Image: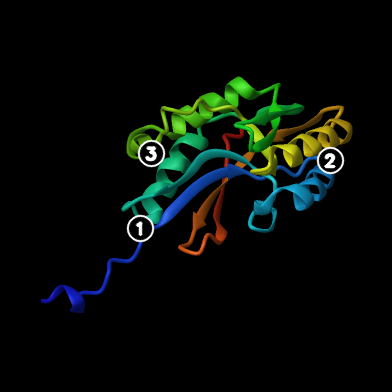
């Protein structure tokens, strides 16, 4: 068949895994993100455990892997306390209490069929993105605002994660909520 008549292959499906917090004070984070994070209209405040990746794996295969890992993991008490800049582009609300357990869960999720998708060139630091600006002056201004808005700490317990799909237009859809181990 001539190349001009072949239809292009559809793009591979993209998946991610995140925790969508519901703690007291989340409305302050969402209001801040609405002013400073261009992704705020696409997805609620979240902590990413598996970053978006394209794969030939079927949804069921990804879901099964996530279920196997997460269902054996105990709930994680987490506290967010510090705001910091990253890469002169992002403003992050960093997890303090629970950060090591979250990082361990992240590492465990990137085993077996998801291992090829782990970015080893970037260290994983559990956080919620608050702002994104290419302009450093705007990022600094957002930092000053965030330091005033998030001076205390916000805490919750991670009891579930959400498997997400990302379509070719960047639209993010929740596929399934998967619960951590409950004794």
> What percent of the width, then of the height, locates residue 28?
84, 44
Q: Nearer the viewer, mark 1 or mark 2?
A: 1
Q: Earlier in the sequence, mark 3 or mark 1?
A: 1
Q: Which quadrant does the N terminus fall into?
A: bottom left
Q: Earlier in the sequence, mark 1 or mark 2?
A: 1
Instruction: From the viewer's perspective, tell me whether residue 149 is left or right of residue 69.
Output: right
Looking at this view, is 35 or 82 the one in front? 35
Residue at which label 1 appears = 12
Dot 3: what SS?
A: helix
Looking at this view, is 55 or 78 the one in front? 55
* Circle on res. 95: none
Q: Earlier in the sequence, mark 2 or mark 3?
A: 2
Residue for point 82% across, 35% down: 146
Instruction: From the viewer's perspective, tell me whether residue 14 is left or right of residue 177.
Output: left
> What percent of the width, then of the height, locates residue 159?
65, 38
What is the C-alpha distance between the residues marked 3 and 1?
14 Å
Residue at which label 2 appears = 24
What is the C-alpha distance between the residues marked 2 and 3?
33 Å
> What percent of the width, then of the height, locates residue 79?
74, 27
Dot 2: what SS?
A: loop
Q: Among all residues in the image, which is located at the extreme left?
A: 1
Q: Among all residues in the image, which is located at the extreme bottom?
A: 5
Residue 4 falls in image quadrant: bottom left
Q: Which quadrant does the C terminus fall into?
A: top right
Looking at this view, is 3 or 92 the one in front? 3
Residue at which label 3 appears = 117
């Amino acid at each position: 068949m001539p190349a001009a008549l072949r239809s292009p292959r559809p793009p591979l499906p993209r998946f991610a895994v995140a925790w969508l917090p519901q703690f007291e004070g989340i409305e302050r984070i969402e209001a801040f993100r609405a002013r400073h994070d261009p992704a705020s209209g696409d997805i609620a405040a979240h902590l990413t455990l598996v970053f978006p990746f394209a794969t030939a794996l079927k949804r069921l295969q990804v879901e099964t892997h996530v279920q196997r890992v997460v269902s054996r993991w105990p709930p994680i008490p987490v506290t967010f306390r510090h705001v910091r800049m990253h890469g002169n582009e992002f403003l992050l609300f960093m997890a303090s209490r629970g950060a090591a357990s979250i990082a361990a869960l992240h590492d465990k999720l990137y085993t077996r069929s998801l291992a090829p998708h782990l970015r080893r060139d970037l260290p994983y630091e559990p956080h919620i993105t608050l702002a994104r600006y290419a302009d450093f002056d705007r990022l600094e201004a957002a930092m000053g605002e965030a330091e005033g808005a998030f001076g205390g700490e916000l805490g919750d317990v991670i009891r579930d994660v959400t498997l997400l799909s990302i379509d070719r237009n960047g639209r993010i859809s929740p596929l399934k909520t998967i619960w951590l181990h409950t004794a």
